[in-house]
Amino acid sequence: MLSTLRKYIEALGGELQLVVRFPNDQVITLVGVFESEEGDKNSSAPLVLAIE
């Protein structure tokens, strides 16, 4: 699960981000698209988009 990977990376002092690359070279970075701390799969942290 992504939430497990996120916790592991955060324990190492990092931050998990998903980067989406489209064929037209558009790049979108997704931050905060992971399960909440309570484990509720229907609720997620705020989504942050960085479009390059």
Image (cartoon, rainbow, N blue to C red):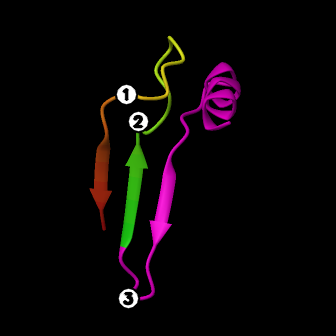
- Name above or below for residue 8 compared with residue 24: above
Coordinates of residue 45 in the picture (x, y in percent): 37, 27
Most foreground residue, 52 or 28: 28
- Tell me which amino acid carries mark 1: Ala
1 vs 10, nearest the viewer? 1
Magenta residues span 1-26
The residue identified by callout 3 is 24
Q: Which of disc 2 and disc 1 is earlier in sequence? A: 2
State the residue at coordinates (68%, 34%): 5
Residue assigned mark 1: 45
Q: Position of residue 29 (x, y in %)?
A: 40, 56
Residue 36's mark? none
Tell me the residue at 41%/42% (across/down).
31
Q: Amino acid at mark 3?
A: Asn
Which class describes the residues within 10 Å of circle 2: few (<14), some (14-19), or many (20+)? Answer: some
Residue 14 in magenta stretch: yes
